């Protein structure tokens, strides 16, 4: 019998499906989001109704939290997203977020809420690169979009559960349940940390060569395309604002249609936020699969343009119908943006630089989103809400245009790059 040569190698386990660690990280994200999404949708109303804060303060509180999250991400990406103990470091981050948010239950002024929100998002920022590095290391290149999409879908499902829990408590107890919501939120947060420690295997970290010296990744080492991508994120970020401001805007618009009932307007706004998270959850995994088939920046640019569409709807402020449309578009936009950005970075950046790259992405997004939230909240407080959302829309479109140089490809099978000719 003629020798037909060696049989082809079997595909590695995990190339045909989402790997074990992606599922475990996804369940962790579900419980984590269940915890803090009980808090986020009611926070702008707690600040304005219970602590006499203005829209500018709402933007400051969430913008400062986003900045804190981003500021710690380069450190987390360089130090904590590497090595065999990164699961433990990630668990510390989940616990910090959970405990800080729970303490809002005893806050009596908005500066105290500011400090606790910053502390919570410092914890979140410390574990975001860890989580993404574990996902990227456990997943073959051709399945990156699917893994990140699955994680984001579970993340959004947790947000649905969190929002539904908050709505239920408000309907049962009224505005007096704000503090109860903050206290109850610690329960799923503790479960998230436990799932990470018990069920995530993280074989990629354990199999890494021991004793590898660590050094800080220089800016010049990051791929040029990634640096152009960060520029687009800055432009878009200064037009981006916290979803809390969108909730506040919709709640304000719903007051007449709710018959002047504060609880009715808040519950209606939270139900729209629930719609947003349902769309976010439902679209995340399909968006990841779509990103695997269309690995360029087109979907990211589309998400930027959709955010401008949300701005246009918030400018109108047409009551319940305007709120439904705004949060529908926002849910689609959020479902596209996060997973397509993560999958693009995971593909474009070489393996050893993935953790630091996600750290850089986090800090760039945080700095610009802080500016965007302050800009939107300031224009709203000291001028008008329509002006705030109009400026945001212009910057969102400009961010999409800035991505244009990254749309070019070198060869059908080669890496994407910007032509230097």
Image (cartoon, helix red, strand yellow):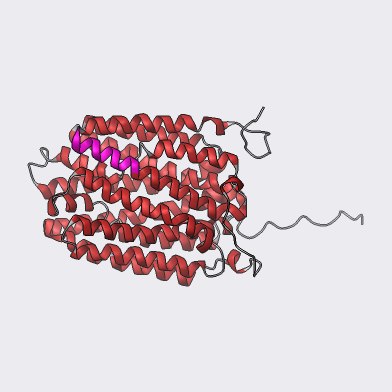
Q: Residue at x 30, y 67 (%)?
A: 99
- Residue 239 among those drawn in magenta: no
* Front-lying residue, 176 or 129: 129
Q: Residue at x 23, y 30 (%)?
A: 386
Q: Is residue 251 left or right of residue 390?
A: left
Q: Quadrant of residue 170?
A: bottom left
Q: Position of residue 376 (x, y in %)?
A: 28, 38
* Front-lying residue, 365 or 161: 365
Majority secondary structure in the magenta region = helix
Residue segment shown in magenta = 371-383
* Front-lying residue, 184 or 371: 371
Q: Position of residue 20 (x, y in %)?
A: 53, 63
Q: Is residue 150 left or right of residue 248?
A: right
Q: Position of residue 201 (x, y in %)?
A: 54, 68
- Residue 377 among those drawn in magenta: yes
Q: Is residue 49 visible?
A: yes
Q: Is residue 42 visible?
A: no
Q: Residue at x 61, y 48 (%)?
A: 221
Q: Position of residue 12 (x, y in %)?
A: 66, 59
Quarter of the C terminus within the rendering: top right
Q: Residue furthest left?
A: 260
Q: Residue furthest top?
A: 421
Q: Residue at x 30, y 55 (%)?
A: 37
Quarter of the N terminus within the rendering: bottom right
* Front-lying residue, 167 or 5: 167
Q: How many marks?
A: 0
Q: Quadrant of residue 276?
A: top left
């Amino acid at each position: 019998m003629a020798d037909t040569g060696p049989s082809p190698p079997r595909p590695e386990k995990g190339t045909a499906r989402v790997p074990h660690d992606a599922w475990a990280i996804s369940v962790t994200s579900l419980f984590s989001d269940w915890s803090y999404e009980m808090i986020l949708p009611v926070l702008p109303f707690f600040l304005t109704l219970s602590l006499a804060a203005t829209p500018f303060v709402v933007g400051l509180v969430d913008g400062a939290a986003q900045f804190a999250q981003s500021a710690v991400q380069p450190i987390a990406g360089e130090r904590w997203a590497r090595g065999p103990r990164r699961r433990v470091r990630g668990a510390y981050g989940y616990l910090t977020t959970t405990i800080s948010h729970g303490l809002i239950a005893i806050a009596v002024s908005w500066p105290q809420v500011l400090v606790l929100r910053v502390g919570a998002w410092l914890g979140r920022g410390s574990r975001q690169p860890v989580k993404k590095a574990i996902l990227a290391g456990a997943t073959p290149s051709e399945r990156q979009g699917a893994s990140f999409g699955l994680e984001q879908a579970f993340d959004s499902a947790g947000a649905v559960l969190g929002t539904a829990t908050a709505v239920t408590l408000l309907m049962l107890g009224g505005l007096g349940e704000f503090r109860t919501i903050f206290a109850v939120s610690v329960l799923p947060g503790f479960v998230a940390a436990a799932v990470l420690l018990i069920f995530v295997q993280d074989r990629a970290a354990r199999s890494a060569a021991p004793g590898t010296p660590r050094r800080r990744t220089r800016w010049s080492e990051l791929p040029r395309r990634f640096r152009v991508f960060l520029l687009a994120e800055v432009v878009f970020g200064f037009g981006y604002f916290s979803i809390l401001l969108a909730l506040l805007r919709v709640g304000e618009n719903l007051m007449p249609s709710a018959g002047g009932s504060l609880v009715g307007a808040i519950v209606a706004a939270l139900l729209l936020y629930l719609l947003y998270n349902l769309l976010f959850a439902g679209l995340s995994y399909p968006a990841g699969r779509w990103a695997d088939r269309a690995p360029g920046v087109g979907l990211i640019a589309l998400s930027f343009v959709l955010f401008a569409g949300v701005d246009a709807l918030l400018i109108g402020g047409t009551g319940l119908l305007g709120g439904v449309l705004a949060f529908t578009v926002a849910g689609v936009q959020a479902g596209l943006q996060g997973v397509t950005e993560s999958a693009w970075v995971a593909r474009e950046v070489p393996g050893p630089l993935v953790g630091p790259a996600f750290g850089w992405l986090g800090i760039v997004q945080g700095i610009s989103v802080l500016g965007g939230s302050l800009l939107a909240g300031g224009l709203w407080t000291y001028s008008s809400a329509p002006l705030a959302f109009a400026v945001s829309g212009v910057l969102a479109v400009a961010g999409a245009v800035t991505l244009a140089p990254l749309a070019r490809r070198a060869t059908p099978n080669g890496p994407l790059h910007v032509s230097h000719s």
